[in-house]
Amino acid sequence: MGTLAERKAVVQQVFRARRPTAGYLNAHQLQGLHAEIRQGGISLQQVEASIQYVCAGDGCEEDELYDVLQEMDRRYFLLQDLKWEFSLLDHGHSDSVTPDQARFMFEAVHGQLFSKRTWQRFLQSRKLPKSGVSFSEIEVDLCNIPNREEVLKEKLEEEQQSQEKFRRREDQRSAQKKREDDERKKREAEETRKRTEEENRKKEEERNLKQKEKDKIKEKKKLEEEKEREEKEKRRLEAEKEKQRLEEQRRLEDEEGRRQAELIEVKRAQEIQLKLEAEAKAREEQRSKELEEAKDAEEAAKEAEEAENQAKREAEEAIEAAKKATTAEEKEAAEKARKKAEDKAKAERESRIRNNLKVAVKSKEKKKLESAIQEFKKAKLKDTDGDLAAAERLIKMHQAKGALVDAMKKRKLSDLEKAVTAVKKGGFEVDMPEEMIQANKLMIRLKRLERLRQEVQNLKQSTVAEIRSYSKPPAAVHQVMIATYLLLGNPEKETKNWKLVQALVGKTGKEGLKRRVLECDPVKVPPAAASRAKEILDQFDLDSVRDVSGGAATFYVWVRLKEILTHHIRWLAAGHTAC
């Protein structure tokens, strides 16, 4: 705008032409001025945000006008790009996007300065947090320049919270291990005592039968070893024969075997699901009955507590009577009354503790269980009704359930299998049917993904080259590769041109197709991309793709499984399991 003096003169002329009120221009005046400079201008909210960012007060003074106009221009041009990107995400032309898509725009615009806390405040400020987000709701926040210091402070606080959570979990784990070790030592001591008594009683009898039993065991062992050798030799011969047969048919049967295995796993998962659903229904009926029993036990606990308090008061009264007694007979009578009241208080306390443990077992609430177990052990009561054992089993069930949910979140197959085995080993399946159903579904998909990963890893370069060699590919091949690159992050408009697909397939190293497929994380796949990939592949079935290209068929199955797993993970993250 020429020299500084010229710019200052122009700014002064424009400012005074607007007839400022009280020495400054308000937001409406600035909006009108900017609309004369740039076609359409910007919204009043954007103008107010510009004033807040540049000016010292609520209005714009003369020496601030140039900088305010610069800030409004920045927002004006940025809005053009943002509106275009918003329209790309608005597939339904509803003038709104999903909250996930809106967050995606925030992360893309703000980059490393994206603030989760600011995003949460935005969601909480909306009357319907999960409804569609219009552009007018987010345009100001998108254009605002994030505060780097606040973002860094937020990340530091998140890291400190994570460390504190880890420390508390370690403390709980140590305390639990100590309790288990103490209980184990107690059991071992009791078992040792009983075993010693039994051994002493049978010692004389066993001495006479010992040699005879040894001879029988030795003979039996000899026969078993001979039989085992024969069976091993038989199995070896059969294995050798089977190996030769499999080597003949492996190339043709591998693919069919994998498909049959998947069908069996799906069938087994369905059977398990039906069984768990039936058990869950039966458990729900049992649960209703247990809740009724819990009410009875709770009433009994209250009555015992009242009786205990009454007995304590009687004991205190007896003590007072003993102090006031003047004769030996009065003192003796008062002492007997005190002892009787204390014995009664003790008995009622034990009754209350036992009933509290029963209530905790029936309710299955972890906090109630821990409190009742601690009080029961502190009172050193005998587990005559088996309630202590039942309560400790429920604590283990809660731990197994937590481990299962964590494993599902991590999506690591080995951890998930370990957690499922722990649940089955503990006999907790009936206590967590929904979690086990989801765990079995996820485990099948992870196994499929791992098998498919191996297939992609073992995919010959010649097969990939065959896909690239098409000058005019069959429609199925082209569409499968569009869907594949959609999940890998390439826009659909980019891969509609087959020559660009050929260039992508021909890349090597970090940008190579096989490496990108192997490193693709379903969590990072946008839901919109997964849905679009499904829509593309719904035009074809696996057999029709396999008929034209074996390599394309491998990517077809990979996209199908990745799309299903992506939506399953989003479903879990939305809180559909008891986390």
Image (cartoon, rainbow, N blue to C red):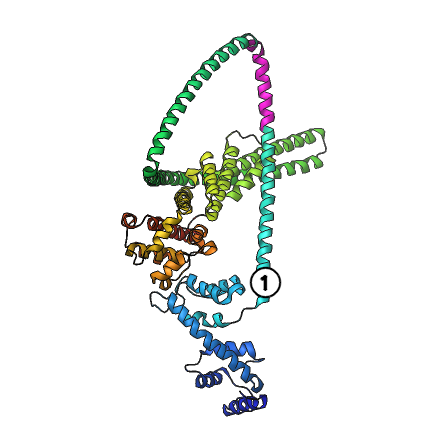
The foreground one among 247 and 272 is: 247
Task: Name the side, left or right, on which 422 lies relative to 160.
Answer: left
Q: Where is residue 228 in the image (x, y as percent from the top left)?
A: 44, 19
Which residue occupies 34% across, 63% down? Answer: 497
Main SS class of the magenta portion in the image:
helix
Magenta highlight range: 187-206
Name the residue: 51% across, 11% down. 213
Q: Note whether 18 is above or below 426 in the view shown.
A: below
Q: Which picture quadrant has residue 288?
A: top left
Relative image position of residue 572 (x, y in whole percent): 43, 51
Q: Where is residue 144 in the image (x, y as percent from the top left)?
A: 51, 72
Horizontal and vertical percent position of residue 346: 60, 34
Q: Is mark 1 on a helix, strand or loop?
A: helix
Q: Quick check: 389 above or below 30?
A: above
Residue 190 magenta: yes
- Give the vertical position of 433 relative to 52 (above or below): above
Q: Residue at x 46, y 38 (%)?
A: 423
According to the picture, the residue beneath numbered tag 1 turns out to be 152
